[in-house]
Image (cartoon, helix red, strand yellow):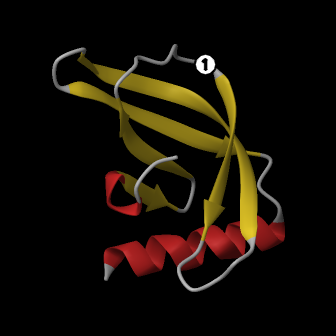
Amino acid sequence: MLAPHTVRVHKSGIQFRTGKPMPVWKEMTVAMESPGKLRKTHFTGVVVDCEGDRHAGYQVSLVFTSVTRHAHEQLSFLAGAAAV
């Protein structure tokens, strides 16, 4: 589980820090929960970048694939809320 302040949400994916490197092109499914809501939305994506080292941690960029209309609306909401 990642703390909300460590995740940057975009309309097409997310960026987050982790202590372990992730291989590029690794497919992942993530669950995100919007503030104030109890319902989780699941997204499938592919790691497109992973930079860093074991001392400072790794910055991972994940691009979502196969985003449903409802999921796209959730992402737009989360991305907008993060920009405020």
Q: Is residue 14 left or right of residue 16?
A: right
The x, y position of residue 52, in whole percent, is 24, 21
The kind of residue on which mark 1 rests is Trp
Query: Is residue 35 or residue 15 the one in the foreground?
Result: 35
Figure quadrant of the C terminus = bottom left
Residue in the image at 39% along x and 43% along y: 16
The x, y position of residue 44, in whole percent, is 73, 42
Residue in the image at 57% along x and 74% along y: 76
Does residue 51 sit above or below 59 in this rendering?
Answer: above
The x, y position of residue 23, in whole percent, is 52, 13
Q: Is residue 46 left or right of residue 78?
A: right
Query: Is residue 35 or residue 62 the one in the foreground?
Result: 35
Q: Is residue 22 left or right of residue 58?
A: right
Query: Is residue 12 or residue 56 the one in the foreground?
Result: 56
| Res 46 → quadrant | top right
Q: Is residue 11 left or right of residue 45?
A: left
Please tell me how many numbered marks the rendered image carries: 1
Query: Is residue 60 or residue 64 the one in the foreground?
Result: 60
| Residue receiving disc 1 | 25
Does residue 71 sit above or below 67 in this rendering?
Answer: below
Determine whether the residue tagged by mark 1 lies in a helix, strand or loop. Answer: loop
Furthest-left residue in view? 55
Label 1 crowd bin: few (<14), some (14–19), many (20+), radius 10 Å: few
| Res 27 → quadrant | top right
Residue in the image at 39% along x and 56% along y: 8
The x, y position of residue 34, in whole percent, is 58, 74
| Res 40 → quadrant | bottom right
Residue in the image at 48% along x and 18% along y: 22
